[in-house]
Image (spheres, grey):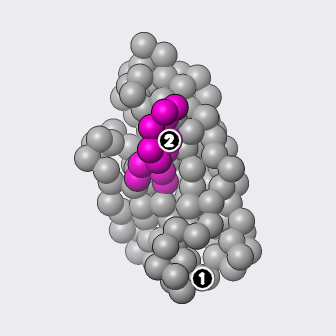
Amino acid sequence: QVQLVESGGGLVQAGGSLRLSCAASGRTSSSRTMGWFRQAPGKEREFVGAITWSDGSTNYADSVKGRFTLSRDNAKSMVYLQMTSLKAEDTAVYYCAAHSLITGRYDYWGQGTQVTVSS
């Protein structure tokens, strides 16, 4: 089992920045990749980006490329999502997730943190 706790959400004006954090604990060795997802009211959950623990390789959704940056601190089992140039359409609940090496799916999820961007 992997436990995930997100933090850092809040209210920010359009054009502003926020940094989300995800603290991982438990059997983190069972996961090679950490992902961030978001879900806006009335919309499907969507992929935001992912980062590997090993070498920090990242990939991003087109909608956030150039604005969001993922990083990780292996010693602290922390993953960060730095969000800049925020837009109203970035408003959503953001979730951290751990990709399982066994199932090949994102099997472990945090409780989510609300990000609200006012225009």
Please tell me whether mark 1 sits on a helix, a strand or a loop: helix
User: Of label 2 and label 1, which has the lower sequence position?
Assistant: 1
Q: Quadrant of residue 10?
A: top right
Measuring from the top left, give residue 106's x and y in whole percent. Answer: 52, 68
Q: Marks 2 and 1, Cα distance to the nearest angstrom?
A: 25 Å
Amino acid carrying mark 2 in the image:
Gln
Give the residue displayed 47% in from the left and 47% down from the top.
45
Direction bottom: furthest residue: 102
Magenta span contains residue 97:
no
Residue 39, numbered label: 2
- In the displayed structure image, the side of residue 4 where residue 39 appears, left or right: left
Going 45% across and 37% down the picture, which residue do you hit?
Answer: 43
Element under disc 2? strand
Image quadrant containing the C terminus: top left
Q: Amino acid at mark 1?
A: Ser
Which mark identifies residue 30?
1
Percent from the top left, x then y, of residue 20?
57, 44
Magenta run includes residue 42: yes
